[in-house]
Amino acid sequence: MANELTLEEKSKGRESYSYWGLVFKRLRKHSMAMIGFFLLLIIIAVVILGPLIWRVSPTQQPEGMEDILLSPCAAHPFGTDEYGRDILARFLYGGRVSIFIGFMAAISSVFFGTVIGLITGFFGGKIDTVLMRLVDIMLSIPTFPLLIALASVLGKGVWQIILVIFVFGWMGDARLVRSVVLSLKEEEFSEAAKAIGVSPLRIMFVHYLPNVMAPIIVSTTLGIGGAIVYEASISFLGFGVQAPLPSWGNMLQHAQDYIFTHQALVWYPGIAIFLTVLSFNFMGDGLRDAMDPRLYR
């Protein structure tokens, strides 16, 4: 009897976990995801709280030449750049800009791609044909040269860069969501909802959307890292965020002339980009494993 009660209690314990409860339980056991998560917490805390502690202007230039390209010292812990600006201040503010661009570009791309995927997967027919051919055309375009061309046309501000990355970032999400919706249309709950007259909008956003949240979350996590790399690449080539506003990308762009003489100008933003993108990728891999459909098996 004791064994039977124990088995029953264990069974009840397992059943008490919801899907998201099991996801978080699995995610906590994923060592690389936890490393990425805590590293991201540190990076985001540093770039958000850092400027509140280190109250130095990232754009202020000294009047004389004596403060140009200084090595790390008490007054400038990371040194100064070729214009005498404090590198630590630019690093902190630049992190805010780069991470903000990554978040906004990835979230807007996933949102738009999700809506397109829901529409094409649900309605099918001519709507599906037209929109999916548009997706095919966009995917066939060499992305990076068009990113540079579009950035030069739209301008070089933060919101312009977000728009540029968004334009070429939503297609993969649209195809992913569409494939999930096509499989959901064959399920019994979908047929039952249509039979009782549930509106298409309610079916798409109340019944289908929760079922595509797992791949959407994973795609968003990986997309943020990709958007940060795109911003850094565009800014490095001189078509991204423009001085005096700092970003990690344009810090690298300004440092390229001093790569052999003042390596610190390259190391600070370069390592920050590397660790941030790596952390998002670790998180994305962990979420993909934790949200595996075989979770309930």
Image (tube, helix red, strand yellow):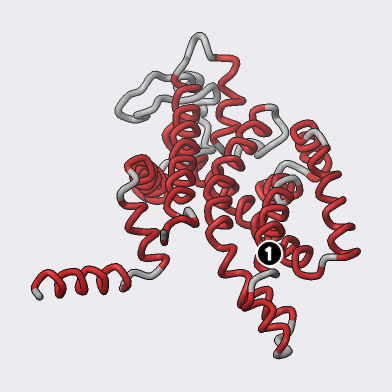
On the image, the x and y values in percent for residue 107 come to: 61, 56
Q: Residue at x 70, y 45 (%)?
A: 165
Element on which disc 1 rests: helix
Which residue occupies the extreme bottom position in the image? 196
Q: Residue at x 56, y 30 (%)?
A: 251
Residue nearest the viewer, comparing 72 with 19: 19
Q: Quadrant of the C terminus?
A: bottom left
On the image, the x and y values in percent for residue 221 come to: 52, 49
Q: Residue at x 58, y 57 (%)?
A: 216
Q: Which residue is mark 1?
A: 181
Residue nearest the viewer, comparing 29 with 194: 194
Task: Decide if residue 33 is on the left or right side of residue 108.
Answer: left
Q: How many marks?
A: 1
Residue nearest the viewer, comparing 166 with 180: 180
Which picture quadrant has residue 131? bottom right
**Type of amino acid at the residue the image marks with label 1:** Val
Relative vertical location of residue 217 with respect to residue 246 in this rendering, above or below: below
On the image, the x and y values in percent for residue 55 come to: 39, 45
Q: Is residue 104 in sight in this rendering?
A: yes
Task: Decide if residue 235 is on the left or right side of residue 99.
Answer: right
Q: Quadrant of the N terminus?
A: bottom left
Q: Residue at x 88, y 58 (%)?
A: 129
Which residue occupies the extreme front position in the image? 1
Task: Decide if residue 8 is on the left or right side of residue 145.
Answer: left
